[in-house]
Each structure stands twice: as C-alpha cells, then as structure tokens.
Amino acid sequence: MGYHRAGFDVDGCDIADRPRYPFSYHRGDALEYLARLIDTGDIRRYTLVHGSPPCQAGCALTIGTNNSQGWGREHAQLIPELRGLLDASGLPYVIEQPNGNAPVRRDLVLCGEMFGLGVLRHRAFELGSWATPQPPHPRHRGYVRGHRHGVYRDGPYVAAYGSGGGKATVPEMQAAMDIDWTDVREELTEAIPPAFTTWIGTAFLTCRQGVLL
C-alpha cells in the first residue's frame, strides 16, 4: 500500500492465498516467480523489487525468547538466495527484515515513531543499487503496552504481534499501523505500516530524478 501511495503500480506474490490483498497478485513461491520473471525477461516491466522474506530464522523473538525457552523450530534462511536473484534481475531492490541477526545490511532503519504511529515496528532495509540518507530517529515517547518478563507496562504504543499479555486487538493493530484492507490477525502481525514504504518509494523516485531525499 505504501508504494501505491508513493505512485507505483504494484504487483504482489505470496505462497499463501491472500484474498484481501488490494493489488495485482500472483500466488506461488516468490523465489520461483522472481526467477521466472528474470528468465523470460518479464522482469524488465518493473522499476523496483521489494522482498520481505520470512523473518523467523533471524528475528529477535526467535533468537532471543524462543531459543532461551526451547520453543519453536528450525527456520530456513532465504535471504542469500533472494539477494542472488535480485542482483541477477538488474533492478534496484529493497529487502526488509525486523530486528535480529538476519544477514541484511541496515542501509535504512525505520520506526513507527518517525511517522507518529501507534506501533514502533523497527524494520531494517537493505537497498540494492540505490541509496538514500537515514532519517532521524526520534526518541520514543514511552513503553510498548503489555507484559514483558512478567512486568506489565502501559504506554503509547501497542504490540502488534502474538496474542494475550496485553497485545493489541485486531482493531488496535489496524488503527496503529493505518491498515484497513485486512482484519486477519496473521496478516496484521506480519505487516509493516504503509507509511514505511510510502517513505521508501518516495525516496527512490526522488533519487531516480537525480536528487537524494
């Protein structure tokens, strides 16, 4: 949605069915789909590629709480394969990941507080074949509401992941991230606020015009 708001025509791909996705959509393995676009030359129809591979292999929750408690399972790390395809595409690209130890460059880090949102949702972005300056990161106004390590704190932000322990309700997540096209909890917990990609898309288009934002 953020890229759409920045002025892009958007095509999406996901291995799961996403009937609420508001733009052109292809269901399938995203790596296979990208490889096919490259092999056929259809990739040249596009200007920019954004990849958000599964984050479980390197996100802070998996490598921290889950590992310490013996929870969860092994997860595949798809970023190296994705990056190889993106480099082969010849197009500028963005790879998005949450905080953690995922093997991405932190060329850009965005936070909900930069946009006055009700979530923090820190995300790192690797930028391929283009660059833009890092915007200032404002001081957080307080805690994320909910329980953490047995202590409950109130605050101006909601936790848009999981359930229980003071986590956000579906309507709270929708309002906090400015997302109204889905009310599916799983999709909301995996989403990034469109304000992030509106900023990125605008920065990219400005850069393409020869001026860095």
Image (cartoon, grey):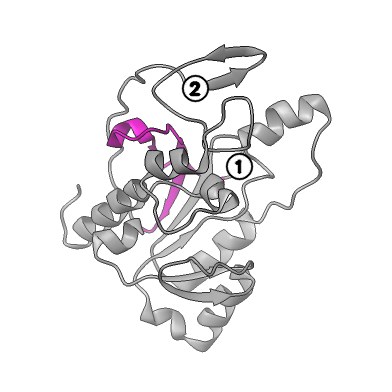
**Residue sitting nearer the eye, 204 or 142:** 142
Q: Quadrant of residue 24?
A: bottom left
Q: Is residue 11 highlighted in magenta?
A: no
Which numbered marker is on residue 145? 2
Q: Is residue 187 left or right of residue 15?
A: left
Name the residue beneath numbered marker 1.
102
**Residue sitting nearer the eye, 36 or 64:** 64
Picture coordinates of residue 207, whole percent (x, y):
22, 56
Q: Residue at x 28, y 49 (%)?
A: 199
Picture coordinates of residue 19, whole percent (x, y):
53, 70
Q: Residue furthest right?
A: 70
**Up-down relation of residue 34 to residue 132 (above or below):** below
**Up-down relation of residue 178 to residue 53 (above or below):** above
Q: Is residue 110 highlighted in magenta?
A: yes
The residue type indicated by label 2 comes to Arg
Q: How many marks?
A: 2
Q: Quadrant of residue 109?
A: top left
Picture coordinates of residue 31, whole percent (x, y):
61, 69
Q: Residue at x 45, y 18 (%)?
A: 143
Span shown in magenta: 104-129
Picture coordinates of residue 7, whole percent (x, y):
24, 65
